[in-house]
Image (tube, helix red, strand yellow):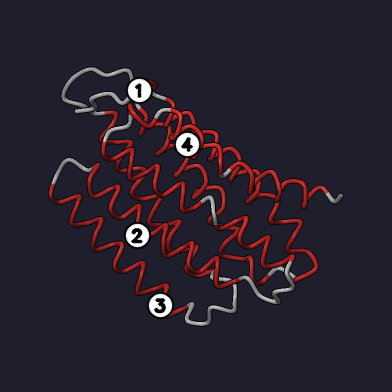
Amino acid sequence: MPIDVIFVLISGASGFFPVFAGWYNYKLLDHILKIVFLFFVISSVFDPLMWILTQTGSKNNMPVIHINVIVTLFFFTIIYCILFSTLVLKRITIIFSIITFIVMMVYNRNFAEYPSESNTALSILLILLSLIYFYQLLNPLTFVNIEKQSLFWINAGVLFYSAVNIFLFMIFTQIPLEDQHNYYIINSISNIIANVLYSIGLFCKPQKTV
């Protein structure tokens, strides 16, 4: 079995890591972590769905990726709006998310094509929001052990995945079709690592951050 296929399969399976972690620790999750957990439950369906479509003879599973990008934008807009402590940051999150959605609708109206611009715009947004949240975490009103913060690990996963893949998303459609699977290993590996970080976060006991 080709190495890229192995990583794709492991990457798809890793989507269930945070689902299991959230299910195991569900009684300890606060309201924001329950929203995060719901996102991972929904997100974990997309990779298996793409695989099923491929196995059943579907010629194009790109619409699944488009829907995944939109769902991710929707959930993380809500999540960061709740996480940010000031009204200004909440408003910035909403404004930037609306701009991101407009970019998605303008540049990726064809759901049969890979959403390169949508993924790139989403990555820029998530990098920005995750960096702002890290700044908020590192400047609390009271002392906290940051490594015990559930959302520290989850935010780290968001930043890591978005930062690693943003350039891949930018150029993916320009890569020759026969070589795309070689480059997509980057996405698979980063997705596995991000899912491990998400899982660590959901295993943590929620702590007061500010």
Of tags 1 and 3, which is closer to the observer? 1
Residue 64 placement, left or right of 143: right
User: In the rendered structure, are the residues bearing label 3 and label 4 in contact, judged by CB atoms less than 8 Å apart?
Assistant: no
Q: Earlier in the sequence, mark 4 or mark 1?
A: 4
Question: Amino acid under label 1?
Answer: Lys
Tag 3, which secondary structure?
A: helix
Q: Which of marks 3 and 4 is nearer the N terminus?
A: 3
Tag 1, which secondary structure?
A: loop
User: In the rendered structure, are the residues bearing label 4 and label 1 in contact, judged by CB atoms less than 8 Å apart?
Assistant: no
Q: Which of 80 and 163 is in front in this view?
A: 80
Question: Amino acid under label 4?
Answer: Tyr
Q: Callout 1 environment at 10 Å: few (<14), some (14 to 19), or many (20+)? A: some
Tag 4, which secondary structure?
A: helix
Give above or below for 24 relative to 7: above
Question: Amino acid under label 2?
Answer: Phe
Of tags 2 and 3, which is closer to the observer? 2
The residue to which callout 1 is attached is: 205
Q: Earlier in the sequence, mark 2 or mark 4?
A: 2
Q: How far apart are marks 1 and 3 (CA)?
A: 39 Å
Q: Which of marks 2 and 1 is nearer the N terminus?
A: 2
The residue to which callout 4 is attached is: 198
Q: Distance between the residues labelled 3 and 4?
A: 29 Å
Instruction: Tell me where residue 155 sits by quadrant.
Output: top left
The residue to which callout 2 is attached is: 74
Q: Which residue is drawn at 41% across and 61% down?
A: 71
Residue 156 placement, left or right of 33: right
Q: Residue 105 carries which label?
A: 3
Q: Residue 159 carries which label?
A: none
Q: Distance between the residues labelled 2 and 1?
A: 25 Å
Residue 29 placement, left or right of 179: left
Of tags 3 and 4, which is closer to the observer? 4
